[in-house]
Image: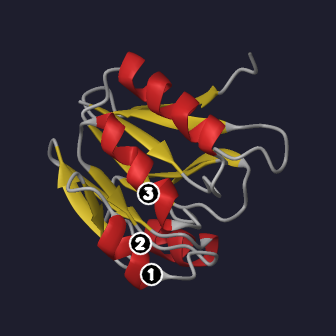
Amino acid sequence: MKIGIISDTHDNIQNIKKVIQKLKEERVEAVIHCGDFCAPFSVALLKELGVPVHAVFGNVDGDKVKLLERKPQNVIIHGEFGEIKLDNRKIAFVHYPEIAKALAIGNKYGLVCYGHKHISIIEKISNTIFVNPGEVTNFLGKSSYTIYDTIKNTIQIKHLMKK
C-alpha cells in the first residue's frame, strides 16, 4: 500500500492542486496531512484525492470549528494527535517535531510523521521511520511530499516541480 504524506499546505491552492495530482499519479491509497491547512477552503480541496485523508491540526489552523465543518467526507481530522493502522503498520502523526520525536523514541510505531519545520527529513530512530514530508506551500522554496510503501517499509521524498 502506498501512503502519501503531506504537511504545511498553508492555503497555497496552486501547490495543493499539484500535490493532489502527483498523489493520484502515485496511486496512493491513503494520505496523511501533518497540519497547517490554514483556511477551511484548503481542506475542502482534498476531496479531489478520492482516498481517505488522515489529518491533524497545526499551529496556524485557527478556525478549527470551520475546518471540521467544511472538511469533505474523505478527510478525518484526528485533533492534535493521529494514530492509525494501515496495512498492519502502526502510524502516528502530529504537527510538532518535539512530540513526534518522543513518539519515535518510544518505539511503539513503525512510522511517525510530523510537520511544522517546512523541511523534508527522513531519519530512523530505533525501528521507527521518523519523517517530515516538508512543505507543500512554497515558503522555503522547496515544495515536497513523501510516499511511504507499507509493503517494502520504505519512504521517499518527492518534490513538486515548477511548471
Res. 96 image quadrant: bottom right
The local crowd at label 1, few if under 14, some if 14 to 19, many if 20 or more residues have their Cα within 10 Å, is some
| Residue located 56% across and 73% down the image | 58
Crowd rating for badge 2 (residues with CA inside 10 Å; few <14, some 14–19, many 20+): many
Q: CA distance from mark 3 to mark 2?
A: 7 Å
Q: Label 3, secondary structure: give it.
A: helix
Amino acid type of the residue that numbered disc 3 sits on in the rendered structure: Val
The reply to whether discs 3 and 2 touch (Cβ–Cβ < 8 Å) is yes
| Res. 95 image quadrant | bottom right
Identity of the residue furthest to the left in this view: 88
Residue beneath label 2, please? Answer: 67
Picture disc at residue 23: none
Which of pointers 3 and 1 lies earlier in the amino acid sequence? Answer: 3
Residue drawn at point x = 45 percent, y = 81 percent:
64
Q: Which residue is mark 1?
A: 64
Contact (Cβ within 8 Å) of mark 3 with mark 1: no
Q: Residue at x 57, y 82 (%)?
A: 62
Q: Nearer the viewer, residue 102 or 142?
A: 142
Q: Residue at x 24, y 33 (%)?
A: 29
Task: Name the secondary structure under disc 1.
Answer: helix
Is 5 or 11 nearer to us in this picture?
A: 11
Q: Real-space Cα distance between discs 3 and 1? A: 11 Å
Q: Is residue 13 left or right of residue 51?
A: right
Q: Which mark is residue 43?
A: 3
Is the C terminus in the top left, top right, bottom left or bottom right quadrant?
A: top right
Q: Are marks 1 and 2 in contact (CB under 8 Å)?
A: yes
Pick the quarter of the image with the N terminus.
Answer: top left
Q: Quadrant of residue 120?
A: top right
Q: Amino acid at mark 1?
A: Lys
Q: Nearer the viewer, residue 73 or 148?
A: 73
- The reply to whether residue 126 is visible in this rendering is no
